[in-house]
Amino acid sequence: MTNHDRDPAGNASTPAGDTDIVLEARGVTKHFPVRRTVGDLVGRRRRTVHAVDDVSLRLRRGSVTALVGESGSGKSTVARLLSQLYPLTEGEIRLGGTPVKAGRGRSFRAYVKQVQLIFQDPFASLNPVHTVRYHLTRSLKIHGKQATEAEACELLERVQLLPPLQYLDKFPHELSGGQRQRVAIARALGADPKVLLADEPVSMLDVSIRLGVLNLLRDLKERLHLAILYITHDIASARYFADTTLVMYAGRIVEGGDSETVTQQPAHPYTQLLIASAPDPDRVADEEDQEETGSGEPPSLISPPGGCRFHPRCPKAMERCRTELPPRFELDGGQWAACWLYEDRPVSTVVPGAPAKGDGAADTTGDGPAPSTTEVAAK
Ligand SMILES: Nc1ncnc2c1ncn2[C@@H]1O[C@H](COP(=O)(O)OP(=O)(O)OP(=O)(O)O)[C@@H](O)[C@H]1O
């Protein structure tokens, strides 16, 4: 993205006519209040967990966006905010370009019909006392579709549970983990959604069947032009499965770009650490690796570090990283990193008449509005 894509306030504008953007988060923030202790009452303190801060992203039709990060970085909270299970502390969500108003009842049902959430544990998300037929026909009914056996079978065919009649009257405990997750996906498809938010959809499955479920999601993305948010702590699977990858650390997105670039040429020291810690049979980790990429634990989100939240673990931290929050710096090929290391990189200029980065197909970053340097640094 270049300065040409920014509005007068310095924010990136939604690319005009980019009809591929289905769901967009702009500066989305979620702080959870912490239950007050005696000390808090005496000191008149109200503490909050800064679970998600200023997250912007765009999900496009027929595209998978991976949101990658360690446990506790805020990934599931982003999914819950995007599915309207939690109210936002700040920010805005847009569906099809229209700001979404928080609500229950009819407006919530209309939203959920288009944006479906798939959970990590398919056993917990399916009711053990009901059959596959019940789960699927109920989903069809709720979303105003014909709840016939033929429709339920079609859903099972879509998730490659064949022949469908063999699965229709099974209970969840009679299915394998992979089959259960396919039923959960089929149930989500009963709504005929535009967006699937898949929160660690394969992490509870046997390693041998993960690939099959990811391939199914990819097939659905292509055939049904779904926009998919793939939440994972496994950056290696993001390279394989996602078109775009966003990396999250301690409640903030720190890097984004097309998956191949982010995983092969990670720019942010945190992404480099994630990749160095990912199991790779071709690489033997040694102490030098550790020194170069850093180690340690993620910070407390009740009182996150000032400046860049990664600075206490960062082997490349500079003085200003402790005090100033880095904005997004644009790199080549649509990649960006929120890291002061890239401050002095020149921003490439736009060739007149050429599609600018951030305008439709040329924008591979999957991220939403980028706040200006001064705006973020001032926060
Ligand atoms: N309802 C809640 N109330 C208070 N704190 C919460 C709540 N939900 C999440 N958190 C906190 O917000 C932070 C982010 O949690 P979240 O579950 O979104 O992270 P995650 O990256 O999805 O982790 P995991 O991969 O372990 O699920 C954590 O510190 C968590 O303890």
Image (tube, rainbow, N blue to C red):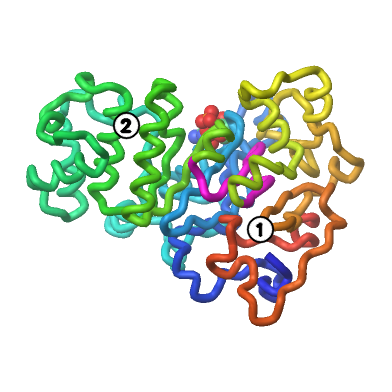
In the rendered image, the vertical position of residue 6 relative to residue 148, given as above or below: below
Confirm whether residue 35 shows in the render: no
From the image, which quarter does the C terminus lie in? bottom right
State the residue position of label 2: 181
At a point 38% along the width and 50% down the height, the residue shown is 221
Q: Amino acid at mark 1?
A: Gly
Q: CA distance from mark 2 to mark 1?
A: 34 Å
Main SS of the magenta part reads strand
From the image, which quarter does the N terminus lie in? bottom right
Q: Quadrant of residue 366?
A: bottom right
The mark found on residue 334 in the picture is: 1
At a point 37% along the width and 26% down the height, the residue shown is 209
x and y percentages locating residue 30 in the rendered image: 56, 45
Confirm whether residue 164 shows in the render: yes
In the rendered image, the vertical position of residue 213 relative to residue 222, given as above or below: above
The mark found on residue 63 in the picture is: none
At a point 35% along the width and 40% down the height, the residue shown is 216
Q: Amino acid at mark 2?
A: Gln
Horizontal side of residue 346 vs 278, given as left or right: right
Q: Does 242 appear in magenta?
A: yes
Q: Does 22 appear in magenta?
A: no
In the image, farthest residue toward the bottom: 353
In the image, farthest residue toward the right: 319
Q: Secondary structure at mark 2?
A: helix
Label 2 close to label 1 by CB (< 8 Å):
no
Crowding at mark 1 (Cα within 10 Å: few <14, some 14-19, many 20+): some
In the rendered image, the vertical position of residue 61 relative to residue 154, given as above or below: below
The magenta stretch is 241-257
x and y percentages locating residue 64 in the rendered image: 47, 49
x and y percentages locating residue 378 in the rendered image: 79, 57
Horizontal side of residue 54 vs 155, given as left or right: right
Foreground disc of the pair 2, 1: 1
